[in-house]
Amino acid sequence: MNLVHAPPTGSMAESSPQTSPRGEHARLGERASADAVRFLVAAASELPAHLDFDSIAEGGEPLAHMAEVRLAAHPCPAGVLLGWRCGLTKPLSLVMDGIDAAHPAARGGSLVAALGGSLVVRAKGEVVLRLRVSGPQNTEIGAIERLRARLRFTHVRMAPGDPSGLAEDPAVVHAAVRDAVARANAVWGACGVSFGPPRDIEVTTVEPPPPHLVAIGCEHGVRASGGALALFVDGALIEVMVERGMRPREAARRLGRAIEARGFLVRMRDNPRISVGADGTTDLSVRTAAGALATLAPPPSGGVSRDATLGACIGGVELEDGLQHFGDVDSAVGTLEERTLIAAYDDFDPTTIDVIVVPGFARGGRLGESFIASDGGGTKNLVVLDRLGIYASRASSTLAHELGHVLLDEPAHTDDDGADTPARLMDADSSDASAFGPRRLVIEECVRALRQSGRSAASPLLSPWPLE
Ligand SMILES: [Zn+2]
């Protein structure tokens, strides 16, 4: 976080505080979130003995107060009238929360601040300066004032019907989502990035989707040897022939046209070939003309494919046993269950980040995962979070971490090459909630986020949100 000038209010007759010259605008260790700043006061007559600081949020709520910060006599810089006196404060850091404020490196000189908020400086009780809190000012691509990304949350229940237990209560989940967004705002504020006011975040609670998606080629994308594909779409039987040598994507188009001819809407998505696959597969997600998800079913005689080699798999979402998540082999594509879930609730808007909250992942151990543009898969700008990941985000940075993969368009972690980076947000272990846990973004990451997700990017997720 950094400071920018805003027109000062109050009397400037006697003293004219100003932010310190460039050389004294120091960063504190590796802590991008805690750029330190010193204040230099020039006074025509008597120098105030100290300054008082108030940090307030954009909405006006007080965040921190620091009284009686001593002004030590200091030579006046060029431009100050002869005979005036100058005083300089100790370095003050702006930090994201009380945990950072208590960090040994910041102790004594740190104020909790929020992107878009203000720092109000008083001398002898009078406001002498008001500064807005913005993103980093000195980067290789210039100053980052404030950027905004739009999040769209979908909370998926375990099963259709009544919510089972408190953890499923939409009000509880929505409150946890807002807390997690506030947390992500605090972490990403270091880069000048905001996800908007948490109270404005929309969360839609939905039931698991019906089996509305069929993957032609199943997983491995083997070509046809000659046969047929047949399935029921909302009770209507639809059948097409496939010829020997036909690729999954060709067979999918033939089936898609046949489904559309019956009045349904088909969204087709070609998946990249997985590393052990013969060819890419193609997903068909089917909706009624009114836009409701259709229900697909195989013929009673057996599977959808009546071809010896070309597979056709209907995707289902069964969350009682957790969401089957991708592994190394299918990370770009996602599992069939994930694709069925995502195709149901992704808004396919390249300027928003969809966050789908599920009751849990299968096999445990995973709190969140992200689908990013550079994976080359059909899904991008999308995060799937375990509900526990949302609850954990209140104290740790699970949501901020997964959003980091999306904004940075970077699947890797800062510690992938073996060097331990426990304090960095993009460290692989994002569950430590202490000041030493993963929460820091460095300037290079701020720059990368703007390059990968700014206005000129293929997926422009970050738009300027000027400070008023
Ligand atoms: Zn990660």
Image: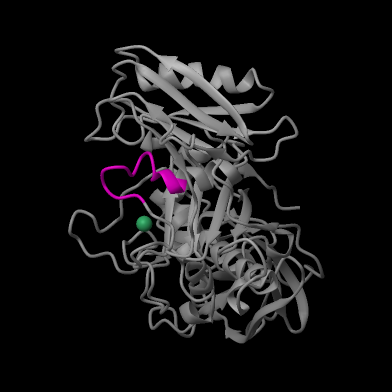
Q: Nearer the viewer, residue 317 or 423?
A: 317
- Classify the position of ligand 1 by quadrant: top left, top right, bottom left or bottom right: bottom left
The verdict on residue 51 being magenta is no
Left or right of 8 on screen, residue 260: left
Q: Nearer the viewer, residue 45 or 179?
A: 179
Left or right of 327 on screen, residue 41: right
Quarter of the image for residue 228 reads: top left
The colour scheme of the drawn protein is one colour
Q: Residue furthest right?
A: 10
Q: Is residue 423 above or below residue 299?
A: below
Give the magenta part as a residue range.
326-338
Residue 155 shows in this picture? yes
Q: Position of residue 223 (x, y in %)?
A: 30, 20
The verdict on residue 329 being magenta is yes
Q: Residue at x 35, y 30 (%)?
A: 311
Left or right of 321 on screen, residue 348: right
Q: Position of residue 169 (x, y in %)?
A: 66, 73
Q: How many marks?
A: 0
Q: Position of residue 119 (x, y in %)?
A: 67, 70
Q: Residue at x 71, y 71 (%)?
A: 15
